[in-house]
């Protein structure tokens, strides 16, 4: 049972322990509850008690900053220990999740409001994470506007690569590819949300000018809403910080305090018996293996291909363990999201990522119960294929 939790669609009863037969599997959102069992096992190490008088101030430091220096240092330590980003020559800017940093960075990289320059075009290659478009379009204005998929500009920009801000998601959401910029020479924001050893091999520390990270995917604390940007240029960092300051006066001090505890617990676990990345990788590779075993029996569906690769964190070749399955329906006329929905599997249709409806995204990040239901429904669906003629 999971006391204190809302039952998901597959469970009922007073403590959510009664399994409902033939329930709908919800694999839509990227809610990272696969790490909940880890923090249940390490309840004390991750716990904070906050007295009513504590952290009441607007500011977190004596010199009036909104960011806790202690948390910033621990985050730098985590990147050094994992080896997934070069932090020494970067400024750190916190936001309320990396969701808020999307627009903070677009603003920071755009021409000044009084500059004569035309607005920046914000672009990303298909299939891209949908929030780049929704966030940018919401604040569209004189300084920047949503420019659509990179493919629209890939030829034109051979002459002029100025004036673009490209979101490069590596590994990508939804198809988990480790991406490179398409429009060479444009300003690039590297969204590194999934560049952690649960999900991907770390070939080398990322060292781009502007990178975006979030606590949501490495620790699983999506509800705390903490993201950070690593920015080389001081002026760009200052503009991003000002954006967050003007928007929300800095990331919540309660969140910063709680995440300090969480990041410290993560750091203390590394390379030991209770290594959070070893735990996360184990869960995710087992899930990928199980889903592959089912889908490989099918002629109707396929998954993205991922090969094992050397990881500098684990110091060995590691099995694939993606956060999402990018499912393709092999028949050209099929709406893959609808096909799966009929079989009681909720997914996120390819059109949300500006891809074809022949594709749909299946989240592998949720709780064990959600994943078990997904495997059951998918197995039923693939078994039914055998009786088709
Ligand atoms: N970028 C990517 C690629 C994501 O997948 C997500 C979450 N699904 C985010 C950013 C936003 O994450 P958060 O706001 O929780 O930091």
Image (cartoon, rainbow, N blue to C red):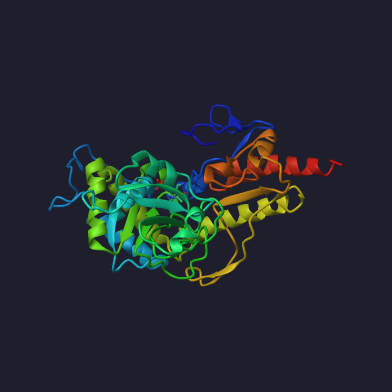
Q: Relative to 367, is 250 on the left or the right? A: left
* Screen quadrant of the N terminus: top right
Residue visible at 19% across and 40% down in the picture: 56
Instruction: Give x and y (percent) for residue 324.
Output: 56, 50
Q: Residue 67, can we see it?
A: no
Towards the viewer: 377 or 353: 353
195 displayed left or right of 247 = right
Q: Is residue 224 visible?
A: yes
Residue at x 18%, y 42% (from the top left corner): 58
- Number of numbered discs visible in the structure rendering: 0
Image-based side of 41 in relation to 340, left or right = left
Counting from the top left corner in percent of width and height, residue 46 is at: 37, 49
The quarter of the displayed image where residue 157 is located: bottom left
**Quadrant of res 69:** bottom left
- Is 96 situated above or below 277? above
Residue 124 percent location from the top left of the image: 46, 53
Q: Position of residue 3 (x, y in %)?
A: 49, 34
């Amino acid at each position: 049972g999971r006391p204190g939790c809302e039952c998901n669609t597959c469970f009922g009863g007073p403590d959510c322990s009664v399994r409902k037969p033939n329930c709908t599997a919800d694999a839509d959102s990227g809610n990272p509850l696969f790490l909940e069992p880890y923090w249940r096992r390490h309840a004390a190490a991750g716990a904070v008690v906050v007295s009513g008088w504590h952290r009441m101030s607007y500011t977190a430091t004596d010199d009036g900053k909104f960011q806790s220096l202690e948390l910033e240092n621990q985050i730098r330590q985590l990147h050094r220990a994992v080896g997934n980003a070069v932090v020494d020559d970067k400024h750190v800017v916190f936001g309320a999740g990396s969701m808020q940093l999307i627009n903070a960075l677009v603003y920071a990289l755009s021409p000044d409001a009084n500059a004569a320059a035309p607005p920046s075009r914000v672009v990303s290659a298909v299939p891209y994470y949908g929030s780049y478009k929704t966030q940018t379009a919401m604040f569209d204005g004189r300084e920047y506007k949503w420019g659509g998929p990179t493919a629209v500009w890939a030829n034109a920009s051979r002459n002029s690569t100025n004036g673009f801000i490209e979101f490069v998601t590596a590994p990508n959401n939804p198809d988990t590819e480790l991406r490179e910029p398409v429009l060479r020479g444009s300003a690039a924001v590297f969204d590194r949300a999934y560049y952690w050893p649960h999900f991907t091999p770390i070939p080398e520390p990322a060292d781009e000018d502007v990178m975006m990270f979030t606590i949501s995917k490495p620790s699983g604390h999506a509800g705390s809403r903490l993201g950070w940007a690593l920015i080389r240029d001081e002026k760009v960092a200052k503009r991003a910080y000002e954006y967050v300051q003007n928007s929300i006066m800095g990331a919540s001090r309660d969140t910063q305090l709680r995440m300090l505890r969480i990041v410290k617990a993560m750091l203390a676990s590394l390379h030991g018996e209770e290594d959070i990345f070893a735990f996360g990788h184990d869960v995710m590779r087992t899930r990928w293996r199980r889903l592959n075993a089912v889908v490989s029996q099918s002629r109707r569906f396929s998954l993205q291909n991922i090969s094992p690769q050397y990881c500098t964190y684990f110091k060995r070749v590691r099995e694939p363990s993606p956060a999402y399955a990018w499912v393709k329906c092999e028949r050209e006329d099929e709406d893959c999201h609808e096909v799966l929905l009929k079989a009681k599997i909720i997914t996120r249709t390819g059109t949300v990522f500006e891809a074809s409806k022949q594709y749909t995204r299946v989240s592998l990040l949720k709780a064990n119960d959600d994943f078990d239901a997904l495997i059951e429904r998918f197995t039923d669906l693939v078994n039914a294929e055998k009786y088709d003629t």
